[in-house]
Image (cartoon, rainbow, N blue to C red):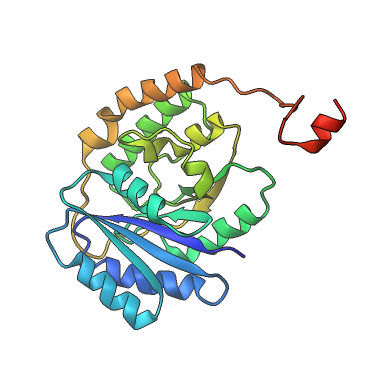
Amino acid sequence: MSLISVVLPAKNEQGNIGQLIQEIHQSLHQQYSFEIVITDDGSDDRTVQEAIDMAQFCGCALQVLSHSHSCGQSTGVYSAVCYAKGDWIITSDADGQNDPADYPKLIMLAQQQRQTHFCIAGFRHQRLDTPWVRFQSRFANAIRQLLLGDGVPDSGCGLKLFPKKTFMLLPYFDHMHRFLPALIKRLGGEVVICPVNHRERNAGASNYNVWNRLWVGVVDLLGVIWLRQRTKYPSSVTVRFDSNDESSVNNP
């Protein structure tokens, strides 16, 4: 099958990124051709060097991109996808809380797709976060379902698979990574939910808190609703005449 690009937006993930690359290699290398694409989003630790050292040790293909300053997770994903060489993209959190052992499950579901555009979205059905974080997520997901109805029970899960060509058709904006299923549905694509594992991070601290988990996304949510309401696609298109097509010229 075609090359798969595993996209990891990373900021200060020293102590996590090396083990994650090793686990990705162990999960994929026997069955799939893959590369890892990391966007270093303004790290001030050894994230990049740790990633390079482990990729060289494992012998897996690696691209590392660097932002001169922190631009956020969505921009990290966008930069990496633009440079990715694979036809399919797997996005995953660089802190190691998404389990690479789940990647083959997403790939298997993607292989069953007949739609041009699709998204296999991870669902952390047994989360290990604190009760307060779980409450935030339940509240945010309930609001999303009420307003968007995209059928995604866990919008905060970073583990997703989609075609690169699908992603490149989507409108870019900050925090767009949280709305990928809804944006792909806007193209007429299929969204499939896949239960996945959730793990504790090994090192460091999360870059997110209650404000950027819940309240910052309100404007983006309204924007996605506006986009969906303004989207119109024909059910089919028939070519009536093409001057570059000899059959059209000879058989009007």
Give coordinates of residue 219: x percent, y percent.
31, 23
- Asked whether 209 or 189 is in front, the reply is 189
Q: Residue at x 36, y 61 (%)?
A: 37
In the displayed structure, 138 sits above or below 70; it is above
Query: Where residue 35 appears, x then y in whole percent?
Result: 43, 66
Q: In the visual, does 80 lie left or right of 12?
A: right
Most foreground residue, 32 or 108: 32
Residue 87 visible in the picture: yes
Q: Nearer the viewer, residue 228 or 217?
A: 228
- Residue 152 shows up from this direction: no
Q: Quadrant of the N terminus?
A: bottom right
What residue is rendered at 25% in x and 29% in y? 216
As displayed, is residue 79 above or below residue 62? above
Q: Residue at horizontal 31%, vertical 24%? A: 218
- Quarter containing the C terminus: top right
Q: Residue at x 38, y 55 (%)?
A: 83
Drawn side of residue 247 relative to residue 20, left or right: right
